[in-house]
Image (cartoon, rainbow, N blue to C red):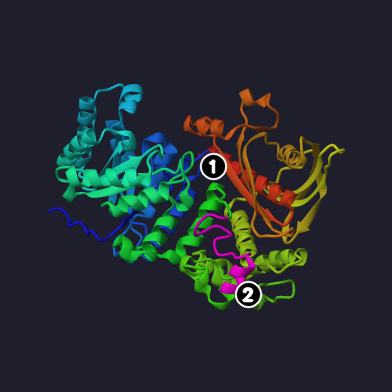
Amino acid sequence: MAETIDKSKLVIFDTTLRDGEQSPGATLNVDEKIEIAKQLSALGVDVCEAGFPIASNGDFEAVKRIAQEVGPLMTNRTSGKPMVICGLARAVKGDITRAYDAVKYAPCHRIHTFIATSDIHLKNKLKISREECIKKAVAAVSLIKSLGVNDIEFSPEDAGRSDKEFLVEILAEVIKAGATTLNIPDTVGYLMPEQYGELINYLVSNTPGGDKVTWSTHCHNDLGLATANTLSGVRNGARQVEVTINGIGERAGNTALEEIALSTYMHKDFFNVHHHIDTTHIYSISQLVIKKTGMIIQANKAIVGANAFAHESGIHQDGVLKCKETYEIMSPDLVGVPSNLLVLGKHSGRNAFRTRIEQLLKDSNYDTKIIENDEEFQKLFKDFKKLADSKKKGVTDQDLYALVDDFLNIKKVNEYYVLKNIHVTSGSSAIPTATVQLIDLTGTVNESSSDITEDNDEITGKVITDAHIGHGAVHAIFQAINRLVSVNSILRTYELKAITEGSDAMGRVVVRISEQNQREDSLGNVAILGEMQEKERLRNNTADVFRGEGADNDVLVASAKAYINAINRLMASKSRQQSQ
């Protein structure tokens, strides 16, 4: 007997790890996907579309491990049910069986299959008739059903430009075949909110069996209307929304989870729906996705942007000081934005630092073991003191987040090299030159190695030094590092973000690198390729891409840290491959 659909429950379907990861440059490795999936579960997401298993072995492994490791989790899940783990599949047998082999390990799992239904897709892409399209859709849903999967989602791709009568016809047939959720994608972000709402209303009202399934939205932001269209869909009968953290996704992105969660929360009576999202976790997972994908959001991004709760206008400031509700419709605490009330400085002691760090770690679901381990805490405190001494202003929560991330980022990777010093000469009339000193922990010695073993903050190893010129300061640093570690790399992406405000702001750098092959050798040691080429190479599995990040007041130091972090990941991967 089918489960009764709660018409007041809004199902939150997150596709950050699938559609979101399709953003150019947003590639995640398996461990990073698992980390984000765990936070999605704790956030209260109902369904996690973990990936497209047929796309690559890496995608299959990620979906499988998420099903195994995240699927059973119940931490902070007020719904009383574990998160559903979903895999995407075209209406093709190989896709479907591959998706099933990945998601079947989760206690609650779903397969999401799709086929294009607009005439422009049928004619130019699939080159099939409408009748053939219906047959393929029904066959796909029937195959999923035969595998013992009872949670089946079907999407008519490009529904926004499809004939409404044809949509009713194909959707009625997949309902008969066993589909339980019908998703109506505005794949190219074409429709206006009124048009999308009318389409949902028409399909809900006219599709035979439509009262027995959950209707879903999936909107893209090409015209900046993804959130508006999704909310219009909810008003017209949709009870599942497909969203991503920070609205990341292909082209202009997808509907932002945080915008839907807060809009429906703030206007409960208007939408007459409820959800199980713990809004206090929104800011921390937003920051996590930024860090892991390198997809930086604009300062005025709704809910999670740096300026979302900032007031510069004198009139606004006066009003907020007298009564917050004058210009703030929600409090920062509601979405987990750090308070910044306790500002630490160079005179702050261990106790004040420990207290603030402990609170930040708990608020953001970090592992608190780094402050429970006295040795690691002392290292972190030393880093804090260095930062505090270098800053004119106090150290803010954002600085502390960056400090912890940088500390954990180094700790998580097998270290082969550690940055000791860099010296850079650059300018409009100077040839950019970088001198780099690293501490070599590999036990190997190359020609530029010092004969003296030195100590750097209790890290002991052989100090190696080299210098190189480049097209700019950062390029020169990377070239020098490459020569020191005897690795030739392709710099896939380089991203820099100021973490805090002001001229003394900390900067976070995210890089992605891979080893160059013979074809790329002529491009130079640190060749720079476009992001689209990077994505194409990833899809063809011709190169492993390694991500590194670093934070510092000096963006050149942050760049060196990020590059070395990526180099360490690359070398750890090669070591694993050689041992297998």
Residue 157 picture quarter: top left
Pick the residue in front: 379 or 77: 77
Contact between labelled residues 1 and 2, with CB atoms less than 8 Å apart: no
Pick the residue in front: 522 or 505: 505
Toward the left, the furthest residue is 1
Q: Which secondary structure, mark 1? A: helix
Query: What residue lies at 71% left-to-right and 40% top-to-bottom?
Result: 485
Pick the residue in front: 421 or 211: 211
Q: Give the x, y percent position of residue 191.
A: 37, 40
| Image position of 212 (left or right of 392) | left
The residue at which mark 2 appears reads as 342
The dominant secondary structure in magenta is loop
Does residue 308 belong to the magenta stretch? yes
The residue at which mark 1 appears reads as 576
Toward the front, the furthest residue is 315
Q: Which secondary structure, mark 2? A: loop
Does residue 10 belong to the magenta stretch? no
Q: Which mark is residue 281?
A: none
Give above or below for 537 relative to 294: above
The magenta segment: 300-319
- Three-letter code, disc 2: Leu
The count of marks equals 2
Query: What residue lies at 56% left-to-right and 47% top-to-bottom?
Result: 294
Give above or below for 448 relative to 307: above
